[in-house]
Image (cartoon, rainbow, N blue to C red):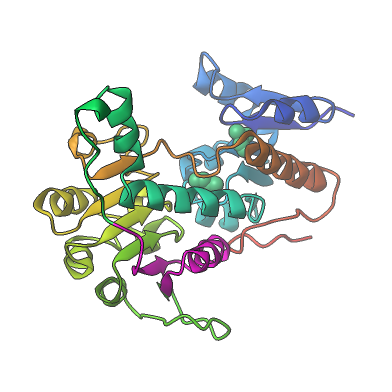
Amino acid sequence: MAKPDILMLTPMRPLVEKTLAQHVTLHRFWDAPDKEKLLSDVGPRITGIVSFVASCPRSLIEKLPKLEIIATSAVGYDGIDVKAAAERGIVVTNTPDVLTDEVADLTLGLLLATVREIPRAEKYLRDGQWPKGPYHLTATLRGRKAGIIGLGRIGKAIAERLEGFGTQISYHGRRKQADVAYPYFPSVAELAKAVDVLIAIMPGGADTKHLIGAAEFEALGPNGIFINVARGSVVDETALIAALKSGKILAAGLDVFENEPNVPAELIALPNTVLLPHVASASVYTRDEMAQLAVDNLLAWLAGKPPLTPVPETPSPR
Ligand code: GLV
Ligand code: GLV
């Protein structure tokens, strides 16, 4: 029997090609010299897509009439048109749980780096400034209250860590969670008003686009720290830059941006930002766990079994 044809949209961890090679014929979309030709040649035979965080629009799904499964190696799947997939009965799988602790760890690192200016202090030393005098004193995490937007698996892991730092926690999400004791705020602005650290870790996509903007930064106030480990789309970046420039908020730590990998020069120029290139899950260990789960989802499906971690918008027919 011919091996199933699978489209690989992005480069992935080596284990993906190594493991899949025995079971499927992989077509590397990202480095195909002529993508349209690849699609017209093999598109009609493709039954599965595998990718790292990627964009998978309706226009691509439409070119793959036999597509059954899209296995992404990421927890967020806002780049995949799940509505287009659901209409065709195509299953989308993501990689929850395996990255939860890694992302929560990085979030705390980013928060501390932002509040205590760790990158700038280190640069001060490397630049030979220390002999000229001590680095200036910074803000503190002591006594701060944190508001988490999106108290899902990762949000809860961040909250657990923050408790260890003695930080009071509140949250906002689509709904109040009955089994959660932290105070709930029905809007981001109300949450921002009540705290001085605002952490975004909700899903991206249309529902959360620009949920945080000028009014929310105004509410957060001049001592406020904003941390984004969600998606760039959840914040109005222009409003964020304005708030950072004018001192409406104190500082921001950002792992995600509206137009990755391009980061606005204005953000880079601001001294009160810590900027990371979307690395919250980016350890070898965790990226391998994610890649393996994506592979396991795909192989389960190809073996006629239910996928392990389908997203709720595209329930598995098996
Ligand atoms: C991550 O999951 C990757 O494949 O790089
Ligand atoms: C990374 O951003 C992910 O969604 O896993």
Instruction: Tell me where residue 183 appears, x and y as whole percent.
Output: 42, 82
Give the left or right position of residue 100, taking residue 298 as reference: left
Which stretch did the figure color magenta?
140-169
Q: Looking at the picture, how far across and down is residue 74, in whole percent?
A: 58, 46
Residue 242 visible to the viewer:
yes
Q: Quadrant of the N terminus?
A: top right
Magenta-span inclusion, residue 264: no
Residue 167 x/y as whole percent? 42, 69
- 216 horizontally vs 26: left or right: left
Q: Residue furthest right?
A: 1
Q: Nearer the viewer, residue 1 or 13?
A: 13
Above-or-below relation of 193 to 14: below
Can residue 172 be seen? no
Residue at position x 84%, y 53% from top? Answer: 305
Residue 263 in picture, x, y percent from top left: 29, 35
Q: Quadrant of the C terminus?
A: bottom right
Q: Residue furthest bottom?
A: 178
Asked where in the image residue 215 lies, by quadrant, the reply is bottom left
Relative to 73, say whether 131 is above or below. above
Residue at 24% from the left image edge and 37% from the top image edge:
134
The image quadrant of residue 205 is bottom left
Judge from the rendering whether residue 204 lies leftward or rightward of residue 123; answer left or right: right
Image: 313 above or below 287: below
Task: Give the image quadrant in which the ligand numbered 1 is located.
Answer: top right
Q: Identify which residue is drawn at 47% across, 80% down.
A: 182
